[in-house]
Image (tube, coloured by chain):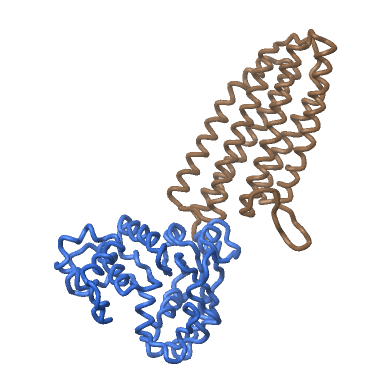
């Protein structure tokens, strides 16, 4: 292999990106766990741990810039580095949503006059599954799996619409819950954005593999892409 | 595919040295007023192909060309075509700057004098040096030896010399390989300016240079029998970000072989 050193750097970079993704997954699940259990210590930890996610994102960014400056990557190498840069930002923002849920948990406190809407944990699980799959599609260069992530976003959008409707109804029927309901609306919004960003990652994977933006479709005439 | 009509076209072009085929079946369209880069590993026939465009291969006794090279509809290898005239219309700049051991002025005036140029020679020399972006550096010492110039200046002087005979196409064979990075960037900048009025074909080993400067790129490689052939041709932005052929990808990402 002519560029063994560069290849190794690219592999390490992707491994670090996946590691960042796993930290973000844990942060999302932990923030929801804290919310369900009303565990303020756990919520505080999620907020504090976001600094690590930010650090790792900047670290990845610096490594990408160094490789671009020193290796003059072209074609698949260039697309890989651009994808890693983009995905690192997506992951960092997903971490911010987990931090946001942690903060909401701390604001709500442990005495809430209503149950947690049942759609919220479902949205969190779906979002984390999408994130896992988007990162697996990156490692495996799997455009079918990336498309699959794209499809899953509709399910999360449906859950989001459902939870919003339910929260608005609750607000009307039980004015005492308006404050908590408003916070839960924000949680729902954060979870919906997490799924959107997992979709963005899948989109970047498709770009990285095919060099084309947008969905990748396999047709009988061959491969083509469309928006 | 081209955004301009082709000024040069090869059809089924093969080149032999004696009985040995060195380039096979190249079908390439060169766009007018654009820069076309020819890239590929050593021995793939880049320079041989380039030299077909102004019949420089005629100077190698054993060289023989099959197929067609059309220049605005004229078959360059057709009966009665004068290769010397072709070389005025299709000029060439070489790897190492090769100024004549004469003054700067006489280097530029050399071609027009041989051509029997009857106009204002001072004006032609100035215009050529301005076009080659070297006028300001040499205008006060036109009668000093060209050999006293730096490598980058000598190369721009050679470009001025090529421009003085008013060519339509400029062939460049590794024009920056003997130059430092700053002189290289100056030549690249000049190439972009010249491409507004001239069609340029550049052979380069420097992939980044091809990516920076060219509008179109042809990738050649060589098969086991040491015969060069064209693998892929396309817009440079596509070749360098998302080539269609995996052999092109392997080459431009440095994983060839």
Residue B61 lies, in percent from the top left, at 38, 90
Q: Is residue A158 above or below residue B130?
A: above
Residue B218 lies, in percent from the top left, at 51, 68
Residue B239, image quadrant? bottom right
User: The chain coloured blue carries which letter?
Assistant: B
Residue B109, image quadrant? bottom left
The answer to whether one can see residue B13 in this image is yes
User: The chain coloured brown carries which letter?
Assistant: A
Residue A96 lies, in percent from the top left, at 61, 27
The residue depicted at 66 percent of the width and 51 percent of the height is A141
The residue depicted at 81 percent of the width and 26 percent of the height is A119
Q: Is residue B48 left or right of residue A143?
A: left
Residue B87, image quadrant? bottom left
Q: Nearer the viewer, residue A131 or A167?
A: A167
Residue B206 lies, in percent from the top left, at 42, 62
Residue with the most extreme front position: B119
Q: Nearer the viewer, residue A209 or B237?
A: B237
Q: Is residue B94 above or below residue A186?
A: below
The residue depicted at 57 percent of the width and 30 percent of the height is A53
Q: Is residue B80 left or right of residue A99?
A: left
Q: Nearer the viewer, residue B88 or A139?
A: B88
The answer to whether one can see residue B226 in this image is no
Q: Is residue B31 left or right of residue B242?
A: left
């Amino acid at each position: 292999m002519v560029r063994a050193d560069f290849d190794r750097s690219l592999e390490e970079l992707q491994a670090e990106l996946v590691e960042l993704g796993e930290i973000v997954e844990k942060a999302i699940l932990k923030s929801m766990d804290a919310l369900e259990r009303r565990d303020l210590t756990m919520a505080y930890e999620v907020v504090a741990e976001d600094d690590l996610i930010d650090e790792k994102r900047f670290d990845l960014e610096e490594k990408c810039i160094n490789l671009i400056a020193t290796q003059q990557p072209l074609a698949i190498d260039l697309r890989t580095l651009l994808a890693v840069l983009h995905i690192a930002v997506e992951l960092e923002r997903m971490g911010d949503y987990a931090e946001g849920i942690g903060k909401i948990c701390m604001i709500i406190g442990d005495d809430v006059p209503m149950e947690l809407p049942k759609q919220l944990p479902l949205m969190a699980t779906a979002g984390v599954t999408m994130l896992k799959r988007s990162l697996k599609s990156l490692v495996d260069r799997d455009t079918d799996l990336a498309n699959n992530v794209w499809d899953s976003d509709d399910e999360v959008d449906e859950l989001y619409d459902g939870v919003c409707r339910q929260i608005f109804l609750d607000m009307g029927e039980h004015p005492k819950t308006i404050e908590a309901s408003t916070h839960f609306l924000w949680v729902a919004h954060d979870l919906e954005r997490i799924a959107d960003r997992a979709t963005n990652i899948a989109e970047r994977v498709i770009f990285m593999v095919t060099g084309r933006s947008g969905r990748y479709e396999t047709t009988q005439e061959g491969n083509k892409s469309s928006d | 595919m081209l955004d301009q009509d082709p000024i040069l076209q090869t059809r089924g072009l093969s080149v032999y040295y004696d009985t040995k085929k060195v380039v096979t079946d190249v079908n390439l369209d060169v766009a007018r007023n654009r820069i076309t880069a020819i890239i590929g590993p050593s021995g793939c026939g880049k320079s041989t192909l380039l030299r077909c465009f102004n019949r420089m291969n005629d100077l190698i006794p054993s060289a023989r060309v099959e197929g067609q090279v059309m220049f605005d509809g004229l078959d360059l290898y057709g009966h009665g075509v004068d290769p010397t005239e072709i070389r005025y219309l299709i000029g060439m700049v070489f790897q190492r700057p090769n100024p004549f051991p004469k003054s700067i002025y006489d280097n530029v005036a050399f071609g027009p004098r041989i051509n029997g140029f009857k106009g204002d020679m001072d004006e032609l020399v100035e215009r050529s040096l301005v076009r080659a972006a070297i006028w300001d550096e040499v205008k006060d010492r036109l009668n000093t030896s060209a050999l006293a110039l730096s490598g980058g200046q000598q190369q721009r002087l050679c470009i001025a010399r090529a421009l003085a005979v008013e060519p339509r196409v400029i062939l460049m064979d590794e024009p920056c390989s003997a130059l430092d990075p700053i002189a290289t960037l100056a030549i690249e900048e000049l190439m972009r300016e010249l491409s507004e009025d001239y069609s340029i074909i550049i052979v380069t080993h420097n992939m980044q240079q091809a990516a920076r400067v060219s509008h179109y790129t042809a990738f050649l490689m060589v098969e086991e029998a040491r015969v060069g052939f064209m693998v892929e041709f396309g817009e440079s932005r596509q070749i360098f970000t998302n080539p269609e052929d995996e052999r092109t990808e392997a080459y431009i990402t440095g994983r060839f072989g």
